[in-house]
Image (tube, helix red, strand yellow):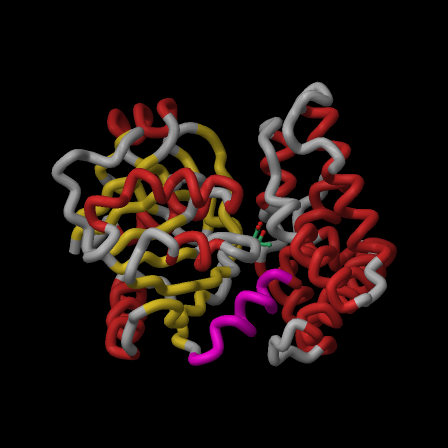
Amino acid sequence: MEILVLGAGAIGSFFGGVLSRRHDVVLIGRTEHVAAIRSHGLRISGKTALIAKPRAATRIPQNAKPELVLVTTKAYDTANAMLAVRPFADRAIFLTLQNGLGNAETIAKTARRVVAGTTAHGVTFEGPGEVRHAGVGETVLGGWARVHEADLVRLRDIFADVGIAARVTSDIRSELWSKLVVNASINPIAALAGVPNGRLVRDRRLQEVLGDVCREAAAVAKAEGARVDSDELYKRTVLIAKRTAANRASMLQDLERRRRTEIEAITGAIVRAADRHLIPVPLNRMLFALVRAREGAVHGGTDANQAD
Ligand code: PAF
């Protein structure tokens, strides 16, 4: 199968690299990453050890005819990335495995057939041509637009065939909200504290904050109609932090690499929904403000990410 990975960061490179064991994969990424992959292959270390040989390019090749497009850009880049896929937007199945809310909606404005997914794998971008699979997690797939059960089962089997366990759900909205709550709990705390995920559940003080942030976010998810349970979500968050103990959360990696974070699509989405339902979320609001301020400081205070 020809597979295009739009956004070869940590997660995209991991999935694309592993899929390239059996499929014709093209990773679309940044110049230095692409150059390194072209000369030495993509090195995956950690829980998965592999030198993968996917094709890599900074732009979508003219003759690309992918059957499957994995969208793994940052949430704030989704709309922009979708501009380049029009030639096959009617044919390919588009699968988002991104963090944050709103990605499937954005993709479905251009693409006809969309699968929404979540993944709890923890992957660290080590440098050009190199990612570390720091924690194993569940991947969940659900239909979003014009896909049939058979398409989902086929995708699940394609993943299983290369060693990535995935599950199909009939309620992807609840899964997306659950993953949002997990990210809203782990990412900003790990980013501000500057610690790997495991510390959030080993340090008593941090674990208390994690629990309080998680419960606030879970109440919002419930009000939005997601079928979630606050205690179950907290357990899931702790489990994911444990399984990805060695990983530096993506938001921490972004701050360390002086990049924009996904705080808007993660904690921002929680705060905006809380406002709609008049639910108090003081901790999430504080984390939102602090991460935004850190981003502003990193960008010299001139970035678009300044306070509204
Ligand atoms: O964004 C991340 O880093 C990941 O979604 C997760 C699962 C929290 C692991 O670090």
Can residue 248 be seen here? The reply is no
Q: Residue at x 48, y 62 (%)?
A: 118
In front of the other: 85 or 54? 85
Residue interval drawn in magenta:
170-180
Q: Residue 271, relative to residue 77: is it above or below?
A: below
Q: Residue at x 44, y 65 (%)?
A: 139
Left or right of 116 in this view: 16: left
Can residue 86 be seen here? The reply is yes
Q: Position of residue 252 (x, y in %)?
A: 64, 40
Quarter holding the N terminus? bottom left
Left or right of 177 in this view: 80: left
Which corner quadrant of the image does residue 275 belong to? bottom right
Q: Position of residue 87 (x, y in %)?
A: 20, 45
Q: Residue at x 16, y 42 (%)?
A: 64
Q: Position of residue 12 (x, y in %)?
A: 39, 46
Which corner quadrant of the image does residue 32 belong to? top left
Q: Residue 200, relative to residue 305: is it above or below?
A: below
